[in-house]
Image: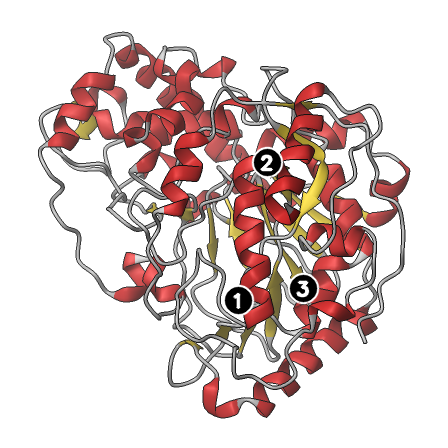
Amino acid sequence: MLQITKRTIHCGRKAATVASTSRLVSNRAQQKEKEEGSIASVFASLSGDKPVELPQRFSDLKKDIFKEHLVESWRDVLTKLKPEVEEVSAVGSAAIPRLSYHQIKTGVDEDSLRRLKKVGSVVVEGGVSEEEALGWKQSIRDYAAANRDKVKGFPADDVQVFEFYHSVAQTQARCHPALRDTQEFLLDLLHASDPQSEISLGSIMSYYDRLRIRKPGDSQFALGPHIDGGSLERWEDPGYRACWKHILNGDYTQHDPFDVSPRLDAQFDLYGAAGGCSVYRPFQGWTSMSRVGPHEGTLRVLPIDLKLATAYIILRPFFAPKRGPQHLDFDDWMLDLESTHFPGSSQGRTQELNAVTHPHLQLDKTMVSAPDLSPGDQVYWHSDVVHAVEAEHRGKSDSSVLYIPAIPLTVNNAHYLQDQRDRMNQGLPPRDFPGGDGESRFVGRMNPEDVEAGPSRQLLGLEPFPIPPGASPGAKRTVKKANEILFD
């Protein structure tokens, strides 16, 4: 029986709506079932795929987007990146803000909030006891042992990233009060520039993802620097491209990574990528089930000013090196509108970055490892933050995490939640992930009827969402539409 403490969801957040979600819902309805696979399907670097020349239309796309003033924007961004790189390389992991769960509950000081919003990542200590977190890991190991002949994941011959979505432990973690409180805090950092945008930031929902139990000495699960949420879609989809309007209009300083309004009409997955995220996921995250620190197979992030790093990534396809990417000065680069090259981008994959594709970020200096963490600690990073997994696990014990992000309720997200709930009932993988029969024939998977009434059932789509007190008209519409989608 899943034991979850009943409590009231904190409400009264800012909310908003978008002009239209019909295109997103229509596309979602047309999605094909994804093939079986693993996390390797998402990354060209893990699957071993070689870069493929993009169609001519991507050169035309560059020309359509480009404006002359972006040359000076490029100069400005390159100039301001230099001191940022030096600062981050000097402080290392200390560049990642750390908060205690007690601070989340009682109030976070302005300086910590400013740092968090600047770099877009945070570590939250406490809230989940070590005993609980270690219990989740043992429960997952027992689940894997009981279904040994049916377990799939990466690498195939010694699974460490499991294609599990419906275990009891994962459900307990998703519904844990400390995770809910932390996610509510993170969503409260967001706002809507358009007060009519249809989003309820006071209503959290769960997005099912995998888990990892990485063994000491492993060097196969080496995810290089990347950003989830598609790659070419950032420029190709008009809704997604609208998120960068200030950058493409020549003033990146006006870009607001925490404005939800332009995100709601963005398509993050135009190519049906295995593992492509089709919901609005403002914060990715994981919860630790082990002691883990630098050099022990942990997360790495790029804690450079998020506005500046995003501007560089968005402008990068329009410019090419004259002599080679190791030359970083403005005069060493030229305008490139004729090629179809979008560095680190490919159809149906996530956005990857390295020293050749994005040299000015100097990722060898600026990608820093998460600090020492205990079982139960949480880590979150903004959806635009460049992140990676250490190439080698040099520790002496496992490096284990549950992937649990912070997701608000939107109309499109509610459609996904409906489908996710139905698949949970059947034990099938969520739609965004590799298909197949998943855990449908597993013994010991989560029984939805065992989830207690209240916030836990709501975030899983098993019970109607309440309208948050003080909700805006946009938030009220969102909750009403979501409940109709889920229960009508």
Pointer 1 or 3: first along the chain: 3
Name the kind of residue labelled 1 in the image: Gly
Question: Residue 290: in sight, yes or no?
Answer: no
Measured along the vertical axis of the image, is residue 138 above or below residue 300? Answer: below
Dot 3: element? strand
Pointer 3 or 2: first along the chain: 3
Contact flag, marks 1 and 2 (Cβ < 8 Å): no
Front residue of this view, candidates 71 and 256 = 256
| Viewport quadrant of the N terminus | bottom right
Mark sitting on residue 138: none
* 3 vs 2, front mark: 2
Mark 1 neighbour density, 10 Å: few (under 14) some (14–19) many (20 or more)? many
Left or right: residue 209 versus residue 337 is right
Left or right: residue 262 versus residue 68 is right
Mark 2 neighbour density, 10 Å: few (under 14) some (14–19) many (20 or more)? many
To which residue does mark 3 refer?
A: 288
Residue at x 74% of width, y 46% of height: 464
Mark 3 neighbour density, 10 Å: few (under 14) some (14–19) many (20 or more)? many
Name the kind of residue labelled 3 in the image: Ser
Contact flag, marks 3 and 2 (Cβ < 8 Å): no
Image-quadrant location for residue 343: top left
To which residue does mark 1 refer?
A: 297
Residue at x 30% of width, y 29% of height: 235
To which residue does mark 2 refer?
A: 410
Image location (x, y in percent) of residue 167: 63, 74
Measured along the vertical axis of the image, is residue 453 above or below residue 393? Answer: above
* 1 vs 2, front mark: 2
